[in-house]
Amino acid sequence: MAAKEFDVIVIGGGPAGYVNAIRAAQLGLKTACVEKWIGKSGKPALGGTCLNVGCIPSKALLESSALYVNAKDASAEHGITVGDIKMDPKGMIERKDKIVTELTSGIAMLFQANKVEWLQGAGKLLKDNVVEVTDHEGKVATYKAKDVVLATGSVPMDIPSAVVDNKRIIDSEGALNLTEVPKRLGVIGAGVIGLEMASVWSRLGSEVVIFEAMDNFLSAADQQIAKDAAKHFKKQGLDIRLGAKVTESKASAKDVVVKYADKDGDHEEKFDYLLVAVGRKAFTDGIVDEAVGLEMDGRLVKADDNCKTNIANVWAIGDLVRGPMLAHKGSAEGIAVAQRIAGQYGRVNYDAVPWVIYTHPEIAWAGKTQEQCKADGIDVVTSSFPFAASGRAKAMGATEGLVKVIADAKTDKLLGVHIVGANASELIHEAVIVLEFGGTSEDLASTMHAHPTLAESVMEAAHGIHKSAIHMMNRK
Ligand code: FAD
Ligand code: NAD
């Protein structure tokens, strides 16, 4: 029997792949998406890492744990007396699972509504744009498409000194499913996952120690912001040990013994659980037949700025290719590629990608850091506005942190905005829009902002570039 034909077959139904499939179908292309994920309930699920074991479940737990801490610690200051507050981690996990199921089945409904065919199982690209799909019962079928989009995402990196056993030594998926609060939690890697997961469990009462191999904290972030954030995390009780290299981890039925080395020598610590969060790697196992001749770039699939691979009509998007491993970056590539396949304009502005770390306070940035500007030889003017000087932040009891604006000294072009503080995840989009339009710090400063809002702090920081901030002393 002849293979069923599509205009587009997407392999992988995460935020890169499912968004690409929906956009392609919207543009009138006959589209299928191959996805093999089996959810926690044992049923096939769309949404990839982000919806099932990433962005969404982690934010659900961050929200529950923040609510608990606020009720416990912040009420008295507001004149509220609260009785005995208890946390049931099982209830928190159940709520998270419900949100995941609702969202992943929502994608299945969107597929139906847009007439995207979901091919359940594992896809493999063969020569001449033939896609072989092995379903969950092991049955194999082949399909053909004019264009194939690879979007198989990423998986956690592993290290020999802490091998994940999913019992005492866990990865991020394990950390999202603990049903007891560890007395002591060890974390390897003070990156995004390490900090977010450490925040959840420390808010619920765990004593958390984070081992970070680098001497610098959050080296990708602007270092003024990283230093300020580190101060707040320390105050919250997160014990972040920099320059700490884990050399061995031994798990028993009830704990894990971790050996590590730093500038002071060799040390040993005992934990109930150890989370390994040392980065993620592109997932390429068995997705393309060797005969296709797909070019790789180390662990990644090689793709140009338009997400084209070296094979005609084969594209690659999301965590599988260069650039930050972020859901919105993958989705933006998914939309752009669908539009290009349909003969329309599609582009991704890699210079205006927002980054967010959903700790308390939140950390967010877009554009260049001051360190990057220096390395690129760009002469800059910077200005920082502390949330402590914001009326809204005071009313909210959220005076931690600051907004930092970086502008080109000659042209005033906005180069970067860096925020540590409440709602930084939302505030950063002011910067993203100005960066997208190639605007100046003056554009940001002269845009009227509602009072009282946290967003006024972004405006005030931008005013500071021109020594015209009203609610702080301007630089000399
Ligand atoms: P994925 O989401 O990994 O999806 C790839 C899909 O391909 C998977 O569903 C997989 O089953 C499927 N697949 C693989 N091989 C095959 C095959 N052969 N056949 C069929 N299907 C296949 N990013 C953010 O932007 N914000 C956040 O807050 C955030 N939080 C995160 C928290 C955690 C704990 C983690 C782990 C990640 C987080 N991320 C976050 C990163 C984000 O999840 C990824 O950047 C994003 O999911 C990448 O999307 P993707 O579509 O490229 O890949
Ligand atoms: P990461 O790259 O953010 O951090 C990993 C950290 O581990 C780094 O600081 C690194 O120096 C350290 N490290 C590496 N090897 C080590 C070792 N042997 N010992 C000690 N430290 C070591 O990676 P992650 O936190 O695992 O997250 C993976 C990806 O998922 C990130 O690239 C991120 O883009 C994405 N993610 C994003 C969000 C978000 O957007 N809020 C949340 C979670 C994850």
Image (cartoon, rainbow, N blue to C red):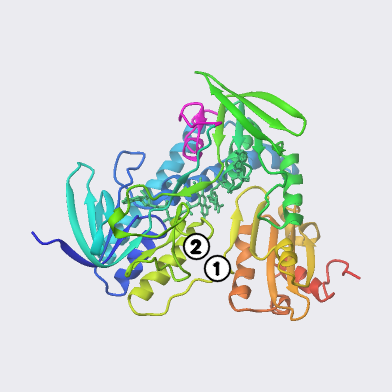
Look at the numbered disc 2 and give the secondary structure of its residue: helix
- In this rendering, which labeled residue sits more in front, label 1 or label 2? 1
Dominant SS in magenta: loop
Q: Which residue is mark 2?
A: 329
Q: Quick one: which residue is furthest to the right in this view?
A: 476
**Marks 1 & 2, CB-CB < 8 Å contact:** yes
Going from N to C along the chain, the mark reached first, 1 or 2, is 2
Left or right: where 335 falls relative to 35? right
Q: Which residue is mark 1?
A: 350
154 relative to 382 in the view: left or right: left
Image: 236 above or below 123:
above
Q: Which residues are magenta?
A: 161-181
Res 354 visible? yes
Report the amino acid beneath label 2. Lys
Mark 1 lies on a secondary structure that is loop
Position above or below: 260 against 470: above
